[in-house]
Amino acid sequence: MILSITNAAGLRFTVSCLRKGDRFGLGGQLVYQGAPLVDFYDPSPGEHASSPLGRCVASYFANELLLLGDESGLQLNGRKPWWRLDPFSLWRLRRWVRAGCPEGADLD
């Protein structure tokens, strides 16, 4: 399932949710068997894309995201300070995760 979300600085992230039984990997050859996993991608040009969604900057299990408070936001990757979700973006992301990561959601 795919989500598009923009942080307060205007950087758009593509977010995917991988659930048990979902296909992934090159050509969808692998079948995911773990707990729901949320991956964050920076689709910006020049970010050395690791997948068609862009460069993967962070991964979290969905239940970990639901345990976070919204107050401070979430730093996705310490190497680049702009790879961050502000408190409001994190709140919107958590709402999407609680809803089961529906396909085609755009929270902007």
Image: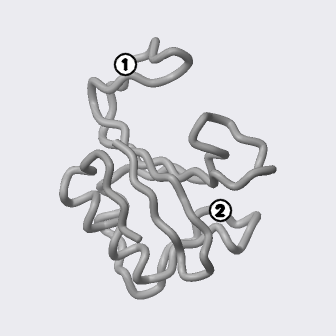
Which residue occupies 46% across, 65% down?
5
Which residue occupies 75% across, 51% down?
45
21 vs 61, nearest the viewer: 21
Which residue occupies 62% across, 46% down?
56
Instruction: Please state if 58 lies on the left or on the right of 38 as rendered.
Output: right
Asked where in the image residue 96 lies, by quadrant, the reply is bottom left
- Give percent across and percent down for residue 74: 51, 73
For the residue marked with disc 2, what is the amino acid? Asn
Which residue occupies 21% across, 51% down?
100
Q: Are marks 1 and 2 in contact (CB under 8 Å)?
A: no
80 to 62, vertically: above or below: below
- Give percent across and percent down for residue 50: 68, 36
- Secondary structure under tag 2 reads loop
- Secondary structure under tag 1 reads strand
Residue at the outermost top position? 29
- Give percent across and percent down for residue 84: 59, 72
95 to 57, vertically: above or below: below
**Location of the N terminus (image quadrant):** top left
**Location of the C terminus (image quadrant):** bottom left
15 vs 45, nearest the viewer: 45
Give the residue pinned by disc 2: 77
Give the residue pinned by disc 1: 31
Residue at the outermost left position? 99
Point out the tag, 1 or 2, that comes first from the N-terminus: 1
For the residue marked with disc 1, what is the amino acid? Val
Instruction: Please state if 5 lies on the left or on the right of 66 as rendered.
Output: right
Query: Circle 1: is it few (<14), some (14-19), or many (20+) Cα within 10 Å?
Result: some
